Amino acid sequence: MSSKINWLVTHTSPGALVLQQWLTENGISYSLAQKYTKSGWLMKLSSGVYYRPSANGDSKPDWTEALQATDIQLRLPVHLAGLGSLTHQGLSHYLSVGKEQVWVGVKSKQSLPKWFREFPDQNWFYCGNHKLEIVPEKDLKVIMVKGKALKASCPELAAYEVVDAIGKLISFEHAAELFQGLVNLSPRKVQSLLERSRSVQTNRVFLFLCHFYDHQWVQRLDETKIGLGSGKRQVVEKGRLDERYQITVPEKFLAKQEEQRNG
């Protein structure tokens, strides 16, 4: 038992989430985990979900622990996405009010365990990316958040996820404000994402916002290789039609473009 406790102490930190599936894979059975719980080595959150208490008892797991455990211990394809990823890479200057929005990139939220979906005091914002095949080695990176190494969207994917969530998780205006600061995106990565994307509307809005802020990298995109479909798309209600991309956008965006063209 002492060797397994040593393993537990070596492989976890105070406050870290510890899942029974992972313990079992590493030789700590359910019954042994119950003994560790009774002796204070582990604290139980829910069935099969524990955390390692700190000496003074003030370290409890937060959303970073939940995300890291789901990725590393369960090996599920999940990552910090969209607004959350931009924020923790210093690319969001939008001052959030109230509880932090934690965006989670996952194929289907139903593939996530119940304990994650019902994690205490946490409201997750799920990004589906159903019309984009993510290539982990290209689109994801590891960033440090609150001392935890988390898998996250690269800035280009995060921008795509933000645009894809307009009208669902974020307003057009908020997404546009985020785009204003994305002056250093990689045109190669953006090109790759938009070529893989099967969402005509997301592609059009992404390109509209690129051109609206006239970022230098947009000049290096080849739009002939990006699926833009045909016909009009209503992005915002009571918006005005942008002739170039055939999408409705808030009136003020087209009015500003007209002002710029008229000097």
Image (cartoon, grey):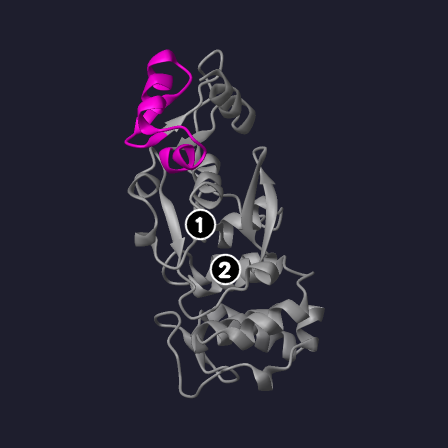
Frontmost residue, 149 versus 91 = 149
Seen in the image, is 184 located left or right of residue 93? right
231 up-or-down from 42: above or below: below
235 with respect to 161 (left or right): left
Quadrant including the C terminus: bottom right
Inspect the image, locate mark 1, and give the three-letter code of the amino acid beneath it: Trp
Q: Residue at x 64, y 79 (%)?
A: 261
Q: Position of residue 219 (x, y in %)?
A: 69, 76
Look at the image and tell me whether residue 202 can be seen. yes
Please give the residue where the numbered disc 1 appears in the rendered image: 103
**Disc nearer the start of the sequence (2/1):** 1
The crowding category of the residue bearing disc 2, from other C-alpha atoms within 10 Å (few below 14, some 14 to 19, many at least 20), is: many
Report helix, strand or loop for mark 2.
helix
Q: Position of residue 57 (x, y in %)?
A: 44, 14
Query: Closest to the observer: 254 or 179?
Result: 179
Do the residues bearing badges 2 and 1 touch, measured as CB atoms within 8 Å? no
Magenta residue check for 128 = no
Q: Is residue 90 above or below residue 216?
A: above
Circle 1: element type = strand
Query: Mark 2 or mark 1, which is nearer to you?
Result: 1
Q: CA distance from mark 2 to mark 1?
A: 14 Å
Q: Is residue 47 magenta?
A: yes
Q: Check disc 2 and give the amino acid type.
A: Ala
The answer to whether any part of residue 255 appears in the image is no
Is 183 located above or below residue 30 in the figure?
below
Q: Which residue is mark 2?
A: 175
Q: Which residue: 40% across, 87% down? A: 231
Residue extent of the magenta highlight: 20-49
Residue depicted at 70% across the width and 76% down the height = 220
User: 10 Å neighbourhood of mark 1: few (<14), some, or many (≥20)?
Assistant: many
Q: Measured from the top left, where is residue 210 in percent x and y?
A: 60, 70
